[in-house]
Image (tube, rainbow, N blue to C red):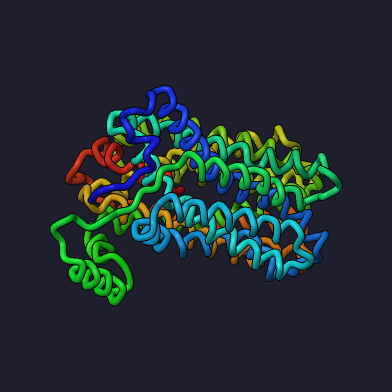
Amino acid sequence: MRFTFRPALVDPSVPKPEVDRIRGWATAVVMAASLMDLVDLTMVNVALPTIRTDLDVPNAVLPWITGVYALAFAVVLGPGTRLGAAHGRRRLFLVGIGAFTIASVLGGIAPSSESLVAARSVQGAAAALMVSQVPHILDALFPADGQGRAAALFGAVIGLGSVTGPLVGAVLLESDLFGLGWRSVLLINVPIGLAGLVVGLLCIAERKDHPCSGTSIAVVRHARAGSRRRGGPPVVRSLFGIRSYAVGIGIELVYGTLGGIYFLAWCFHMQAGLGWSPVRAAVCMLLFGAAVAFSAGLARDALFPRYGWKALQAGVLTQLAGVLVYGWQTQHYGTGIQSWQILPALALLGGGMGLTVAPLPTVLLTDVSREHQRSAAGLGTTTYQLGAVLGMSLVPVAFLGPLDAGHPVSAAFSHTLRWIACLLAAAFLLMFALPRHPRRRPSDASRTGADDTSTIV
């Protein structure tokens, strides 16, 4: 392959400080776009109870305000990568961030739940277009010896977005910025998106994937046509012959479903059920996120390299303990439960999730050859997103249904926790099918696949 860049980054006459400045701005804009994607998803989760009341959203439609975003993201992620290879990474990134900004406007002024769902679907597709280009843009921006630092920085941005998103959304709701209410959660993307477009146009270099000079153009057309006839890249089918990958994909699906049910029901339990303010609910989510982050680092750096998939099972059992504690507290305290009383349950749930989820990308990629790492990681992300959509679609059955049938909020949330326990049991059993001795050391797989998995989560 060969790559084409804008002259500012390759012209030897350009002073190094100028090159570094352009590279810094380009890095900032791709990081900000990815952060905007993550923060937007978690902010809207916090705002759902308010949206439900304001737009009188039916229970059957409510989960799709977030679910359709995840579904569109999952569907467009793979094609977005291939479109970027054919038409230019910079071009597709800018199209994505522009469409995301327009969809944010449409969502922010949506007069009905149906129009809001439609805008969210466009947002999800646009987010996939821009996020799928990020690892390739970073590859072009940083030389080989600097890509480790870029990946570490990106991982920090991902963690920041996951943890702070609910709190940012809650603050916007509580402040009622310009009297916009929940609409500010979507409209806040507009100035960020416009700034990203301007900086991206000025500073991001174009990168296209071209065939090697000795390859017939006829050959390329034949290969692309064959890929379309098979419905995607030929590597995907062969991946499922790798036991660690096939089982890992199953665990990704279960955990996506689990997350889709739990986080949506939890937001409603805290706000609509217990009457907590969005900020109070977001602080609890922040504590949960802190527990996930701490245990994730412990699992990735120490426990998984030493104990393998047993560390994942320990995480599942820790989460099951958290479910039991939370279920007992919900039944015992009812609507009078206080924030400090659920801290032990949050520590167990968040800690267990970090122990399990952090090593999952390594489990997926341990026995996958280097040339197939990106495809394997992308399919894993798509599977998780589809699981999240499935989980969100089950919230009316697992939580809202019992609530609307007249059951108290404590009983409805306990019913949700039983669903979570069943999914955790399924994940625990799946882990017994993981190979005891992978063909490559987990640390090797982590190094080769870290960039791929961290940039598209």
Instruction: Please provide percent x and percent y for residue 126.
Output: 54, 58
Instruction: Please provide percent x and percent y for residue 255.
Output: 47, 53
Give left or right: position of 326 versus 140. Answer: right
Instruction: Give the residue displayed 65% in from the left and 68% down from the top.
Output: 118
Give left or right: position of 324 versus 255. Answer: right
Task: Report which quarter residue 79 is drawn in.
Answer: bottom left
Furthest residue in direction right, as rendered: 179
For the residue pair 283 and 90, the one nearer the viewer reads as 90
The tally of labels here is 0
For the residue pair 448 and 60, the one nearer the viewer reads as 448
Task: Report which quarter residue 326 is drawn in.
Answer: top right
For the residue pair 145 and 183, the one nearer the viewer reads as 145
Instruction: Please provide percent x and percent y for residue 192.
Output: 63, 43
Residue 17 in the image: above or below residue 454? above
Furthest residue in direction front, as rendered: 13
Instruction: Give the residue displayed 37% in from the left and 35% down from the top.
Output: 9
Give left or right: position of 34 versus 417. Answer: left
Give left or right: position of 185 versus 145. Answer: right
Instruction: Give the residue displayed 47% in from the left and 61% down from the top.
Output: 74
Furthest residue in direction left, as rendered: 214
Instruction: Give the residue displayed 71% in from the left and 68% down from the top.
Output: 115
Instruction: Please provide percent x and percent y for residue 347.
Output: 57, 35
Q: Can residue 457 be seen in the rendering of this structure? A: yes
For the residue pair 297 and 372, the one nearer the viewer reads as 372
Q: Can residue 258 be seen in the rendering of this structure? A: no
Task: Report which quarter residue 346 is drawn in.
Answer: top right
